[in-house]
Amino acid sequence: MVTTHNLGFPRIGARRELKFAQEAFWKGQITEEELQITGADLRRKHWHSQRNLDRVPVGDFSFYDQVLDMSFTLGNLPERVSKSGGSALERYFRVARGRSGQESSCCGVQAGEMTKWFDTNYHYIVPEFQQDTRFQLNADRLIEQINEARAQGLTPKPVIIGPVTYLWLGKSKDDSDRLTLLDSLLPVYSELLDLMSNHGIDWVQVDEPALVADLDADWRHAFSLAYHHLKTSRLKLLVTTYFGELRENLQLACELPVAGLHLDAISAPQEVARIVDWLPPHKQLSLGVINGRNIWRTDLGKTLDWLEQIHEKLGDRLWLAPSCSLLHVPADLNSEEQLDPEIRGWLAFALQKLDELAILATALNQGRNAVRKELAESALATESRKTSERVHNPSIETQIQAIRPDLGQRQSPYSERITAQQQKLDLPLFPTTTIGSFPQTRDIRQARLQFRKGALTEAAYRQRIREEVSRCIDEQEVLGLDVLVHGEAERNDMVEYFGEQLEGYAFSQFGWVQSYGSRCVKPPILFGDISRPRAMTLEWTRYAQSLTEKPVKGMLTGPVTILNWSFVRDDQPRRDTCLQLALAIREEVLDLEAAGVGIIQIDEAALREGLPLRKSDWAGYLDWAIEAFRIAANGVSDGTQIHTHMCYSEFNDIIKAIARMDADVITIETSRSDMELLDAFRGFEYPNDIGPGVYDIHSPNIPAKEQIKALMAKASERIPAERLWVNPDCGLKTRQWEEVLPALKSMVAAARDLRGSIQ
Ligand code: GLN
Ligand code: ZN
């Protein structure tokens, strides 16, 4: 019999229950106990829906982030937090979110750094290390949850992050080599394993996705060391990799002295056969055969075609699972009542993926006949998608073929363009601006909900948005910002908003996926060829501009970001899909320019996260990603200023590609990492204007003027003052007006001081 299991279940709840509970707790509207009850309820529900699996994941639930959970389990808290008071959960959230000086009588606490989880749109809290970091086990959370799952009559399989990946994900705060901490870390892992074993656990899933990354000899050696150390445990370890191919680490992974290995057979299909051959005969092989990162139904017949042969070879040693944690997909397709039935028939969310897993297991265990009906349905869905006219639009496919290399070329180089732009715009030194969105108040979201439900007419809704745009312009005028924005009140989400207006997209109602903490995104579903039936942003930008003499930036989301934040069709190369998006955005850019909009920002917040995990694959991706941006942006005349914005982009390694985008101004995330990102600008002279973020919008902390000036001073060590802009790290939509106004006030005051000090 094959064993079925799951690597992780979406924790936020089918109706985002966790999000609402977290936020209520942060606002003091519910108690810690109430939050804990919501957590326990969700876990119970999620295990119930996984009850048909042979083993259910335990420890995958988290109140914020699984990496932060691991830091707590290992007793690795930043000192600034362990010294601050409050309950364990309060301290936990303090690492995640920081604490402002205002909210406590003493001092603020800086939030931990956040970064992308491999190549996904999930963000984790980066573990912090120092040479003298010591670890201490705190397994209460895990043990409690093991007991909970068992009380439900299930077989728990705890999920932890493995020691090497844990170190690999972190960052040394004192430049010491974090790998030297392995020696002191391993005994704590041993202790944890022993403890779980004492609680009757037999298998533990030890996530080591670092195995699919580029590792140098020291890191590879660390894997051997670590697992030889942990070998003494009575527990069986399932070393789990996902998101990519093992490549040169394949043999290393196969030879680790553990009881089992999980391979993501979706992203590394060509490695399956080699692993089946190489894996020592006493080991179990778990194959991730259902895509845990997209929402398409699996072609079950096709999967069985290759899986049956493997099953024949491995017999009971074969385990089946989704390719990775289902954290990256929405919970349940059955919640979706408004999806077009044809498109709905092509989809599978987390629960449906587990059903598919069960069908595959039954087919292997009892023969295909036992699931004849289910397999026929799967075949039908596959065929329907392949042949649907809604997917294929021959005229778009022809346009992509016809793209010439100069389509993405600006008329003149930056040095000439900036003069033309400066003449038109007449901006001061250190111009101030924001990244686009202003607070999405309850009121706006409520109005949108009412409108969608039909309780508010379109005219009334649009009037509401106009009022909001007008308020936003007024506030910016009062603040004295130089380049204004309309505030994006009409947008639910920077990608969904565009998807909704493009042909080739479909939308779920409840397809939420956690991005970080309580923040969820609902990626639109890009299922077919893309076209733009009409202008998407023109009206709001024009309206905003009509209210002020100051320049208003047009605000678009770039093709690469739209692609990377959507669930994307898997039936053609991503490049082709991205170029289709680029042509649609280009039309919008040209419409804005024709309407007299002098500054157009094209956000590519997700450009970096699309980077392949392996460096050797980067150039291929960057080539088409940058080409797509250039096609979208560069059809304008010299006097039109193109901005782009990126968040969490570590620039050092892609700075040259970013420069190739040739945007006149780029705004980036830097404040959380204390301008460290700007190191990139030491070795490579970035040729155009740049706005390093000086206000960390992910934290409730309000920056003081002096703090901002200090950051800008650091920035001007790297970049000439006349090319610097002053702006926040990212959009302000998740913040409150009460936070945003004083923060921007500090920002404008800082810019004024800086101008004074230069003249
Ligand atoms: N213009 C967008 C906003 O301000 C950019 C968001 C982002 O980069 N994630 O909300
Ligand atoms: Zn951003």
Image (cartoon, helix red, strand yellow):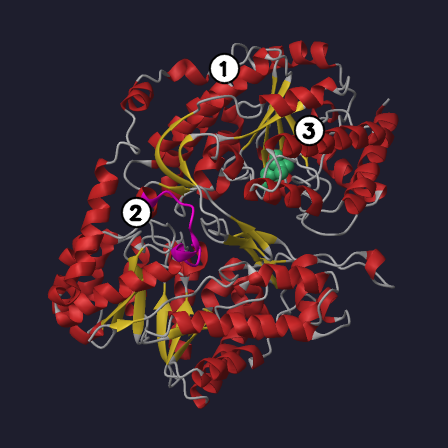
**In the image, what residue occupies the spot 53% across and 27% down?**
659
Q: Amino acid at mark 1?
A: Gly
Relative image position of residue 207 (x, y in whole percent): 42, 66
Mark 1, residues whose alpha carbon is within 10 Å: few (<14), some, or many (≥20)?
Answer: many
Residue that label 1 marks: 635
Identity of the residue drawn at 60% across and 32% down: 458
**Residue 53, located in which quarter of the rendered image?**
bottom left
The answer to whether the residue bearing label 1 lies less than 8 angstroms from the nearest atom of ligand 1 is: no
**Badge 3 amino acid:** His
**At 23% across and 39% down in the image, what residue appears?**
386
Determine if residue 266 is in view.
yes
Q: Quadrant of the C terminus?
A: top right
The residue identified by callout 3 is 486
* Disc 2: which residue: 346
Q: CA distance from mark 1 to mark 3?
A: 23 Å
| Residue segment shown in magenta | 329-341
Ligand 1 quarter of the rendering: top right
Residues at marks 2 and 1 touching, judged by CB atoms closer than 8 Å: no
Task: Locate residue 524 relative to residue 547 in the image: left or right.
Answer: left
Tag nearer the camera, 2 or 1: 2
Query: Is residue 408 rendered to the left or right of residue 418?
Result: left
N-terminal-most mark, 1 or 3: 3
